[in-house]
Image (cartoon, rainbow, N blue to C red):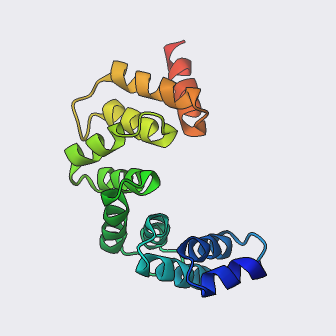
Amino acid sequence: MQKLQQDALDGRFDAMNRLGMLWRTGHTVEQDFHMARYWYERAVDGGFSPAFSNLGALYEQGVGVATDLDKAEMLYRQAAAVGHERGSVNLASLLLGLGKDVSFALELLKQFPANPRALFLLGRAYESGFLVVRDTSLSHEYFVRSAELGYAKAIKRLSQLNQHRK
């Protein structure tokens, strides 16, 4: 921990982001969301793309800060702009949840065909038919691909779908 702190103090943005993650999870330190935000903000100031996604998640979930979906979206967009996968998937998830920029969100998810969460979100979108034209075959295909990658929510959803078919 001391080395990580020293690296962060020496200006290493990856170390700042890692410290934020440790404070957020409470791994090896007592959980402190304010300290997590502090270190994520330092890393964001340095342009470290994973920190944009991590800080965005704090604002989306209202953890250690007041919930601010506009700020979360802005941070996720900055991460997505440089191709950061988690930030892109987080942005797409947020947009779909808000029913906003749906076409953009779906295209963003399709950029990550090996990301199980992205596949699951695509499956949910096509299953529901609220945001896009309902396509249960395509939905099922996305769920299967996500489940094959070990995504628990997709495995559960496929199990539920199989129960309904019996």
Question: 133 above or below 66?
Answer: above
Q: Residue at x 53, y 75 (%)?
A: 13
Residue 39, image x, y percentages: 56, 81
Q: Residue 106 falls in which quadrant of the image?
A: top left
Query: Of residues 44 and 58, which is closer to you in this image?
Result: 44
Residue lying farthest top? 166
Count of numbered circles in the view: 0
- Asked whether 104 or 44 is in front, the reply is 44
From the viewer's perspective, is 96 left or right of 48? left
Examine the rendering and report whether any part of residue 30 can be seen: no
Asked if residue 166 shows in the view, the reply is: yes
| Residue 25 located left or right of residue 67 | right
Percent position of residue 31, x then y: 70, 77
Please tell me whether residue 130 is drawn above or below residue 23 in the rendered image.
Answer: above
Q: Looking at the rendering, in which quadrant would you find the N terminus?
A: bottom right
53 left or right, relative to 134: right
Of the 4 image quadrants, the one containing the C terminus is: top right
- Residue at horizontal 31%, vertical 62%? 77
Q: Is residue 97 above or below residue 109?
A: below
* Of the pair 144 and 82, the residue shown nearer to us: 82
**Toward the viewer: 166 or 55?**
55
Q: Residue furthest front?
A: 10
**Residue 101 pos. (x, y %):** 20, 52
Q: Residue at x 48, y 39 (%)?
A: 115
At which x and y percent is residue 38?
54, 85
